[in-house]
Amino acid sequence: MSFDDDFAADALPALYAQFGTDATVTRGAAAAVPVRIIVDRGQESIGEHGRVYGLIDTVSFQVAEWEPVPGDVVSWTDHLGSHTKTVEAPVSNDGLEAKVVVHG
């Protein structure tokens, strides 16, 4: 790992502790696993020529806690209520943090 990777790996848990939300995630019939996530609502989905096609919700995970795949179900409660959403597609995964599009 490079210095930047080491720094990011050390700082990521603190960022999730401060800005994250407690959640559970399940895959298939397996038991729910507690994780800490960062939810971004209303992200613009941008297509060809910078055209906005719609708004999406994304959830970021620390890969050390959980590496999401399409079909995983994420549940959390925040100031807007209780939410249960299904992982639709990956956005990014740098080996430390994975961001996915969720729906539901």
Image (cartoon, rainbow, N blue to C red):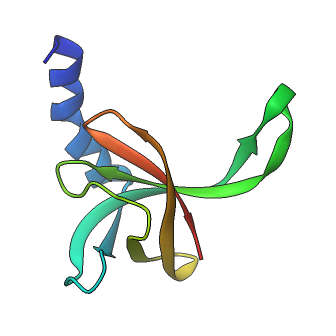
Q: Within the image, what quadrant is residue 7 found in?
A: top left
Tell me what residue is drawn at x 23 percent, y 16 percent: 4
* Percent x, y of residue 78: 47, 75
* Left or right side of 45 for 81: left
Q: Position of residue 55 (x, y in %)?
A: 74, 55
> Compared with residue 68, is residue 9 higher up or lower down, i.e. above or below?
above
Q: Nearer the viewer, residue 48 or 96?
A: 48
Q: Is residue 2 above or below residue 94?
A: above
Quarter in which the N terminus is drawn: top left
Q: Position of residue 28 (x, y in %)?
A: 30, 80
Horizontally, residue 16 falls left or right of residue 64, namely right
Indicate the quadrant containing the C terminus: top left, top right, bottom left or bottom right.
bottom right
Which residue is nearer to you in this view: 7 or 2? 2
Image-quadrant location for residue 52:
top right
Percent position (x, y) of residue 51?
86, 36
Q: Quadrant of residue 73?
A: bottom left
Q: Residue furthest top?
A: 3
Left/right placement of residue 49 relative to residue 64 reads right
Residue 40 seen: no
- Residue located at (82% from left, 31% from top): 48
Residue 36 position (above or below residue 104) = above
Q: Is residue 87 above or below residue 93?
A: below
Confirm whether residue 69 shows in the render: yes
- Residue at horizontal 21 percent and vertical 82 percent from the top: 30
Residue at 54% x, 83% y: name it: 81
Number of residue marks: 0
